[in-house]
Amino acid sequence: MPSPEMMFPIILLLIDNDDDRQRVVELYHAYKGLFYKVAIHYFGHDYCEVEDAISSTVEQICRYYEHVRKVPEYKLPAYMRKIVESVCMRRMTKLQRQRQNTISFDDAYCQDIHSSNEDMFTSVFDRTNAQDLLNSYDQLSERDRKLIWMRHIDHMEYREIAEALNTTEGALRAAVHRAKQKLRIAAEAKRGDA
């Protein structure tokens, strides 16, 4: 998502009056430090999430400017904090739901892995289809091959891969899941062609 400053020309179109548009820009600059402080509290140094939260906050201010305009000046700091906290909490809830869905998918694989002494790669991907999987591996994008290799050949933890690729663990889990699905689909297509 673009930074809040980049979004102003587009988002400000939600406001009809030029003076009100200017006021939104002034509010952003006056409370930008507060917005970042709150977003960093929620998302740490995941700057993509921080920027998304700030952008969504600016959008909320524009979208509900009629309410914002009526807030007395002395109440504005608390009101602005409430807006950014609300945005962050909604985003955190959404991310937690995504992680739970991804984790429950991966937990099923972990149970399979721990229930047998097979090699991790062959237990995750059915052994009878190993040759099809290997033959299909080159059809994946370089990133998908790298993700599967790091997770299932090098046996790296999700946390380690996320750090190495400079992404969040939740996003990484979803990306690995998608890469494995693509590999399965490619292998099934190859079996169908045979």
Image (cartoon, grey):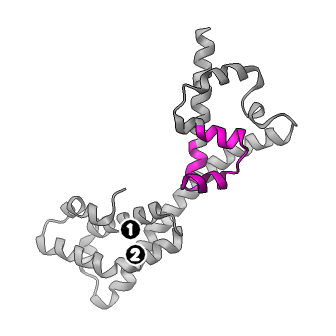
Q: Height in image: 144 above or below 165?
A: above
Mark 2 or mark 1, which has the lower sequence index? 2
Taking the view exactly as shown, the residue that stands out farthest to the top is: 194
In the structure shown, which secondary structural element does the residue marked by tag 1 occupy? helix
Q: Is residue 47 magenta?
A: no
Residue under label 1, please give it: 54
Dot 2 crowding, Cα within 10 Å, few <14, some 14–19, many 20+: many
| 79 over 117 or under it: above or below | below
Q: How far from the left and from the top, in percent, is residue 162?
A: 60, 53
The kind of residue on which mark 2 rests is: Phe
Q: Residue at x 54, y 25 (%)?
A: 139
State the separation of the CA atoms marked 2 and 1: 6 Å
Q: Is residue 176 left or right of residue 156?
A: left
In which quarter of the view is residue 116 placed?
top right
> What residue is at 51 percent from the left and 33 percent from the top?
141
Camera-nearest residue between 147 and 72: 147
Residue 64 drawn at (x, y percent):
28, 68
On the image, the x and y values in percent for residue 89 come to 50, 67
Q: Which residue is mark 2?
A: 35
In the shown orientation, is residue 160 left or right of residue 60? right
Residue at x 68% of width, y 47% of height: 104
Q: What kind of residue is marked 1?
A: Ile
Left or right: 24 in relation to 147: left
Q: Quadrant of residue 16?
A: bottom left
Q: Verify CB contact (< 8 Å) between mark 2 and mark 1.
A: yes
Q: Which residues are magenta?
A: 146-175
Marking on residue 170: none
